[in-house]
Amino acid sequence: KLPPEAVVFFTGENTWREYPKWPPARAKPINMYLSAQGKLTDKAPTAAKASDTYVSNPLRPVPYYGKPSSRIDRNFMSADQRFAHRRPDVVHYESDVLTTDGTRAGPLTAKIAFDTTGTDADLVVKIIDIFPEDTRRPRSKKDPNPAFMGGYQHLVRAEALRTRYRNGWDKPKPWTPRKTETVTLKLPDVAHTFRKGHRIAVQIQSSWFPFIDANPQKFVNVFTAKEEDFIEAEHRVHRSKALPSRIEAVGWMGL
């Protein structure tokens, strides 16, 4: 008997699974569309024009973690993202409460219709599991006092792209201000079950400091950029019928 191609730990349900092929054969395409009023839905947009804007200032970047630290803290990989949700330079979309478990198992691709007033921009996309408001962490011998975790925004996956490389690492290209292009950003494969009663969220931002160095938002050499090269820029995420921003995933059940 051949060993399985993939032995995978599924977060969200804390279960190991074996698969002869990855992604699993039962996984089917699931699109999650950015929609009006901060909604995340499985229905493609129908509006002729629709978008959300945010202003990014590289001198006041979004931190990678909610707690100040002099080093990269590995806890950021599953940290609560409410600190980012509250910022005006982060756009946030979330699903309705799930009525059944929803599993994502395999590749994740963000396709974001995007434009900017600058000539360069970073694009950071996060996939988040929002816990129900009455969630408490179970007691254990090490932690006899369960922590209240209602509304916890658990980071599941995230990835960043310096969009000057949107056409390839060997083809850096400046943005034409306010020209819209669809940026493809591949996130790491996922194996996560969003439980019934939870919500799925997507956050988009343009800095993630200091995990990703600050982008001047001007098409210059980042390593030799001067302070005056670091400029504010307004970024726009489109979510219309012609320009649908979405997360392409595979999985089963749920949104």
Image (tube, helix red, strand yellow):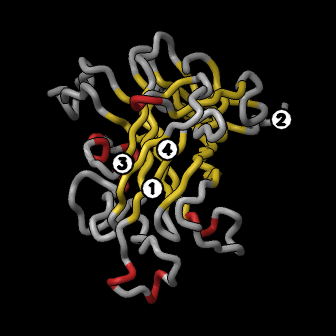
Q: Quadrant of residue 25?
A: top right
C-alpha gap between disc 3 and disc 4: 16 Å
Residue on which the image places disc 3? 90
Residue on which the image places disc 4? 157
Return the mark for residue 200: none
Q: Is residue 128 left or right of residue 119?
A: left
Residue 106 to residue 150: above or below = below
Looking at the rendered structure, the secondary structure element under dot 1 is strand
C-alpha gap between disc 1 and disc 3: 10 Å
- Precedes in sequence: disc 1 or disc 3: 3
C-alpha gap between disc 3 and disc 2: 46 Å
Mark 1 against mark 2, which lies toward the viewer? 1
The kind of residue tagged 4 is: Arg
- The residue located at (57%, 64%) in the rendering is 163
- Precedes in sequence: disc 3 or disc 4: 3
- The residue located at (30%, 47%) in the rendering is 84
> Neighbour class for label 4 at 10 Å: few (<14), some, many (≥20)?
many
- Precedes in sequence: disc 2 or disc 4: 2
- Precedes in sequence: disc 3 or disc 2: 2
Return the mark for residue 2: 2
The kind of residue tagged 2 is: Leu
Residue on which the image places disc 1? 235
- The residue located at (35%, 67%) in the rendering is 232
Q: Are marks 1 and 3 in contact (CB under 8 Å)?
A: no
